[in-house]
Structures are given as C-alpha cells and as structure tokens.
Amino acid sequence: MPKSLSAASSRRGLFLAAVFVLIVLAGGIGWYVHAAGSAKADADAADSSSASTDASSGEGILLGLAKSAVGEHRIVAPAGSNAYEFYLSVLQLDPKNAAARDDLNTLFAQACDDVEQAINARDVDEAQRELSLLRDYDSNNYKLALLGSKLSAQRMVMTREHEAQAAAIQARAENAAR
C-alpha cells in the first residue's frame, strides 16, 4: 500500500502543479489583456483630444465634409461640393495627409466610373470638369488617359451630329426657298 499511496500523492502533486501553472498562465493573459486595453483606451483618449483639435481646424472640417460627401455619393459632382474637391483642399493644406490620400485612392475607381457615366450621358462639359479634377490628383494614370480619349471621341461624334443637323436644316431652308 505504501507504493500506491506514493503514486497517488505523486499524481496529486503533478495535478496541483499543472493547475498552478494554468492559473499563473491565465493570470498573465488576463494582466496582458487588461494592460493592452488600458493602453488602447489611453491612446484613444489622446486621439480623441487631438481629433477634437483637428476637427476645429480647417483640415478636420474639410475631412468631415469629404466624409459626408462620400456618404451622399457626391464623389466628383456637383462642382464645389464633392469629396474629391474637399480631399484635394486638405492636401493643399497638408500635402502629407495620409487620410486624404488613402481616401482619394479608395475613391478613384468610383470617380472614374462617374466620369464615364457623364461621357456616356453626353454631358461632355461636366465630364471634362470631373476628368480635370481627377487629373489634379493623378495626372499620369492610364485610366484617365483612356477616359480623355473617350471624351474626345464623344465630342467628335456630337460635333458630326450637329453638323449633320445643321446641313439638314439648311437643305430644308433651301428647298423651302425654291
């Protein structure tokens, strides 16, 4: 019986040691999570105080206007009240503003789609304004070159249509004069 008692106490000691290690490990994890949460809360508090300072500055106001314009799907239109113009204004104040640059990059494909829709709708003046706005941000983008070519082609088609209409009107006027 002494051997079995010794084996049982050995197993019990091993079990208690394992429980102790698990408790210490759980405590360490809990402490780490609490410390990380406190650090994040401190960083958030610092960010919110600097964000409130930024919000009252020109950049903060423009970023807020840009965000609301994006929420209302005013990416490149109407003139004077769209996200691209607001973000470009932020970059004029702070050329290294990462938030404005990231958002402009994110919105670029959608803005190109808006320009293409204006071209397809034959609103060439608005399409030209929107395309110029995108070129202010990224003048070397191949997509903008393609859109510029499409806009030029649309202008030519419309010019030919107007010339044909003018010729038809002139022919009717000449026939009526005879």
Image (cartoon, rainbow, N blue to C red):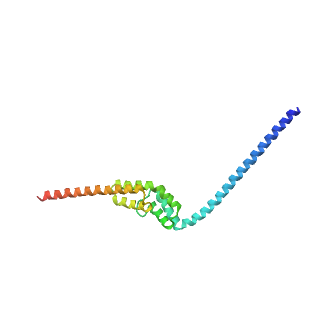
Give the quadrant of residue 6.
top right
Q: Where's the C terminus, which quadrant?
A: bottom left
The answer to which of 144 and 36 lies nearer the viewer is 144
Q: Can you give x and y, in whole percent of width and height, for residue 36 in the image?
A: 67, 55
Apparent side of residue 7 relative to residue 55 in the rendered image (left or right): right
Q: Residue furthest left?
A: 178
Apparent side of residue 30 relative to residue 172 in the rendered image (left or right): right
Q: Can you give x and y, in whole percent of width and height, for residue 128 in the image?
A: 36, 60
The answer to which of 112 and 52 lies nearer the viewer is 112
Name which residue lies at 52% across and 63% down.
97
Name which residue lies at 72% across and 47% down.
26
Total labels drawn:
0
Q: Where's the N terminus, which quadrant?
A: top right
The answer to which of 163 and 175 lies nearer the viewer is 163
Name which residue lies at 86% across and 35% down.
5
Give the quadrant of residue 125.
bottom left
Q: Can you give x and y, in whole percent of width and height, for residue 170 in the image?
A: 18, 59
Name which residue lies at 60% across and 62% down.
47
Q: Residue furthest top?
A: 1
Apparent side of residue 151 relative to residue 164 in the rendered image (left or right): right
